[in-house]
Image (cartoon, grey):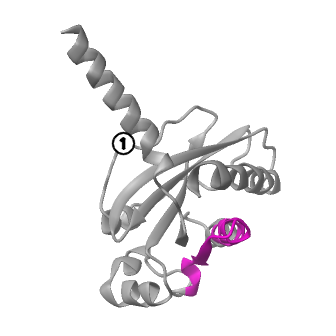
Amino acid sequence: MKIQLTALLVCVVASFNAQLTELHLKNALVVGQLDKPEDRYTVEINLTELLTDAGIKAVPSLNMMKLGSDATLLAGDSIQRLVAAKGIDTYVIVSVRGFDRRFKPSERKDDLNTALGAGSLFPIFRDEVVSVSFEFLFYRNGQFVTSDIVKCGNVSERDTVIKRFRKKVAKRIIKKWK
């Protein structure tokens, strides 16, 4: 019984650790799921720059559709063919997970269409918060690959959130996504 339990525990730990190490991100369409258009634009452009600086081909979703369009359009066949023609097979969906707490990556493994249809209730910054957690969902060829959380602490205004986002995510790209 102990051997079976130990083997099961080893398998669970190995699969948990393997989730992020098997990403090997080479290209990405960056999709920001934020209510405010300026927040969405800021997150998409900053993440696209960080990925490009790390040698990963990246395109913001704002280049694929009009500002204010429903994100579920990105799961449509015509846009997916257009994205694939640009050599992109991975979608990165970014959203704010919450404030001032430790969050674990979501255990939901929705398909791309469902994930794009989900909304976000949180802005990038809220008064009287000291940390913001961003969630990243990765989809390759329409199927869920993995998720990750990046917590940006010691924030006092919107510009500080963006500064911390750039610093933390740049390190995460090199260590775990690439």
Check the image and report above or below for 134 versus 15: below
Residue of label 1: 107
Magenta segment includes 97: no
Residue 118 horizontal/vertical position (percent): 39, 61
The magenta stretch is 44-63
Tell me: residue 53, above or below residue 135: below
Position of 121 with respect to 75 (left or right) is right
Badge 1 local density, few (<14 within 10 Å), some, or many (20+)? Answer: few
Residue 158 in percent (x, y) is at 77, 55
Left or right, 12 with respect to 125, comes to: left
Picture quarter with the C terminus: bottom right
Q: Which residue lies furthest to the left in this view?
A: 1
Q: Is residue 121 visible?
A: no
Residue drawn at (31%, 86%), measured in percent from left and top? 77
Location of residue 172 with respect to 91 vertically, above or below: above
Q: Position of residue 81 (x, y in %)?
A: 37, 88
Q: Where is residue 49 in the image (x, y as percent from the top left)?
A: 71, 71
Question: What residue do we see at 35% from left, 58% from top?
Answer: 144
The amino acid on which the numbered mark 1 sits, given as a three-letter code, is: Glu
Q: Nearer the viewer, residue 134 or 56?
A: 56
